[in-house]
Amino acid sequence: MALDLPFIFMLLMGLAMLAYVILDGFDLGVGILLPLAPRHEHDLMVASVGPFWDANETWLVLGVGILLVAFPLAYGVILSSLYLPVAVMLLGLIVRGVAFELRFKATGWHRELWNRLFFAGSLVAALAQGVMLGGVVTGFEKGLAFTLFGFLVGVGLAGAYALLGATWLIIKTEGDLELRAVRWSRFAVVFAAAGVAAISLATPFASERILHRWFEWPKILWLSPLPLLTLAALLGIRYTALRLQRGQSTRIWLPFVLTVWVFVFSFAGLAYSLYPYLVIDRMTIWQAAAAPESLHFVFIGTCIVLPLVVAYTLLSYRVFWGKVKDLTYGA
Amino acid sequence: MSADPLLLARAQFGLNIGFHILFPSITIALAWVLLYLSVLRLRRPHQPWIAAAYKMWVKIFALSFALGVVSGITMSFQFGTNWPGYMNKAGNIAGPLLGYEVLTAFFLEATFLGVMLFGRDRVPPWLHTVSAFAVAAGTTLSAFWILALNSWMQTPQGYIVIDGQLHAADWFAIIFNPSFPYRLAHMLLASALTACFLVAGLSAYQLLRDRDYEPAQRMLRLGVLTAALLIPVQIAVGDQHGLNTLEHQPAKIAAIEGIWHTEHNVPLLLFAWPNAQDQRNDYPISIPDLASLILTHKPDGELKGLNEFAGKHPPVPPVFFAFRVMVGIGLLMAAVSWIAAWFVLRGKVHPRWLLRVLALMTFSGWIAVLAGWLVTEIGRQPYLVYGILTTAEAASQVPGSMIAITLTGYCLVYALLLLSYLVVVTQLARSATGGQPSEPASGELQPTGTVY
């Protein structure tokens, strides 16, 4: 068997993580934006992500699952190093996950409490994921500077999620809320840009090796399209949002698509920098890989099941296509 | 303050997994109940009670499912944060089984739950029922994989050791390891009984408020009849599971039965106070020869005592007591469901006292399930993978203080969630009968009785 299974599983893990940040990103983003909207629009905002959030979070489990299945040695190292931010993220995800259900069912002040917790959980989860990302690109170094850097990445990631959420709401809602979402996206894009810039500036200094890979001639030629494309996409979001706001455009899906491209480009940059390491300069995908017979066993199942997963995920997005009207729940 | 990190890590993982199992133990079986209602509605679309019952129970299902998902995501991380040694040693086997659970079960149930909850007006009725089937199949597949892994940790086989790491030699032997069929059947039945008592209990609560509420009458009947039928099966399966444990994990049986020294004619202890210091039982109440009879099918059969497993057996009191709690609750559930089923079969109305008893036992399945898992998990100690890897070897180097902080956080959040869950489930049951919600502000909690 000539398949390089660790490499294939690294690709799969990367795709699962990318799918996670984009998909759960938009529903976390809607959570982060919730307090900015007047109360009577809260139900509609939550309804726009209600059918999806659960499956969206499953991509996180798949990503971590592949880390566990394919790279058990790195799984232990990474999760032990990120112990605290992981715990904080989990608490955030727990609180907002149940808030989805409880805010529909609670009454009176309970309901308001769960609205607040929905927001807080979404924000905390986003910040914690940023801190984790900061840890990954700096090789889990400890110290004040690294902690601050982690928080900076956290704010950037929360902003990027808010951008995904706002551009998602542009597609899914109408009238006042849609206009509000357009304004939010123009604002959130600044945070997202700052986050992308922070990671891009810090990553090459985390390791000599990455520095060389970035700035050595002719490798720099390979890399240069990525920052340029990212910048173009970010500017494009501001521009299209402005046109939507002025009623000069009807392409409501364009800001969301451009935001997805920002995530894809940033992710490609990260992957380029880190490869082939799972723990920077310490552990490569081949060093961390599980035994071949285990990878093989899962690979066969993945080839059969993953296309099905993608197919019925697409089916579900098709079922809920179009503007969300109101909350038809459970009937 | 220096707390033992190993103990804290176990407490944290135990809290998490104990909180988690409450919700799958409801949803695994409740998903099939919803499928049943969904099929019923396809065939008889003009029966108002079906729609009303479905509407209420799908909400309870969704809430239980969400709690199961979020605590389950937590677990997928805690395997690594709390037990990195487990993945180092057995990751080649544990990883693929968990991977298959995510691939075949998690996406299926999560995606189709979205259609089931929000898609009623957007898909044809048959596709809605297919979604209910996909959700039910997903929850059961999930139980299949996770119990395969748990059973393998209890009765490992099908592996070889290379450089101190376990490698898979035979996947079929790994998945269908000796204790798997018994544990899977035992857990699926436990889930069915938990859901039956939840259904019957909440329906009884509704009937106490409104005797003529038809959805509750129907669901109560469904709950108690199914429970009355399944409990004898569960007792038989539990007995077989016990014999299987005696064969593969005799130390666990010795702890369950409180047998300190190997002997013949072992009595069955109904109650005692295990005294670990003097290695004997204080204040025993017992039936002579019965433990030997149950476990060896001979009154004078020999049972191995804890003395044969010095340093390699679990702590006796938690296993001993948890087992008696599980069996005690099980017998109580049997008695109550049989009495209630008798009323149903005779076509008689359930008296108020019986409705009260059923309402009080709404969550009795939870206690039995938790007690059962305590028996089997503590009973595996000091091992994490039986005979291969101890729990202490698998623990992480994370400092105790950090575990203590996060443990406190989890405790607070879980307490809040459990409380909210109980309040909301009760409110849903109450508002379905047309009673006033405790606070009148909300638009969502309109009496659902007016829907049809």
Image: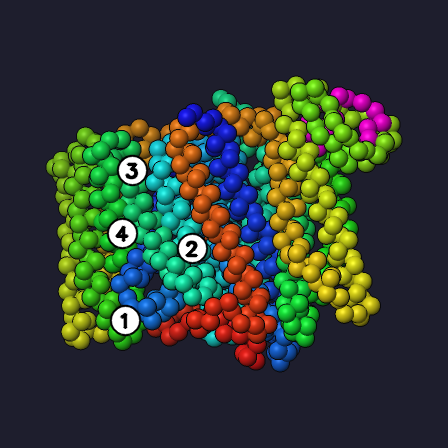
Residue drawn where x is 55% and y is 79% of the image: B450
Of mark 2 and mark 3, the one earlier in the sequence is 2
Residue B99: image location, x then y, percent? 49, 44
Q: Quadrant of the N terminus of chain A?
A: top left
The residue singled out by tag 2 in the image is: A97
Q: Is residue B389 left or right of residue A287?
A: right
Which residue position is annotated with label 1?
Answer: A177
CB of mark 2 within 8 Å of CB of mark 1? no
Instruction: Give the mark nearer the N terminus: 3 vs 1.
Output: 3
Is disc 3 in the same subunit as disc 1?
yes
- Same chain letter for marks 2 and 3: yes
Chain designation of label 2? A
Q: CA distance from mark 2 to mark 1?
A: 23 Å
Tell me the kind of residue under disc 1: Leu
Colouring convention used in this rendered image of the protein: rainbow
Query: What chain does badge 1 belong to?
Result: A
Q: Earlier in the sequence, mark 2 or mark 4?
A: 2
Q: Tell which subunit mark 3 falls on.
A: A
* Residue type, numbered disc 2: Gly
> Which residue is denoted by mark 4 in the rendering?
A158
**Which residue is depicted at the point 44% across and 71% down?**
B442
What residue did someone put label 3 on?
A136
Residue B56 sits in quarter: bottom right
- Where does the magenta region start and end? B248-267
In front: label 3 or label 1: 1
User: Are the residues under marks 2 and 4 on the same chain?
Assistant: yes
Q: Earlier in the sequence, mark 3 or mark 4?
A: 3
Q: Is residue A309 visible?
A: no
Helix, strand or loop for disc 3: helix
- Picture quadrant where residue B145 is located: top right
From the viewer's perspective, is B250 left or right of A46? right
Q: Nearer the viewer, residue B22 or B232?
A: B22
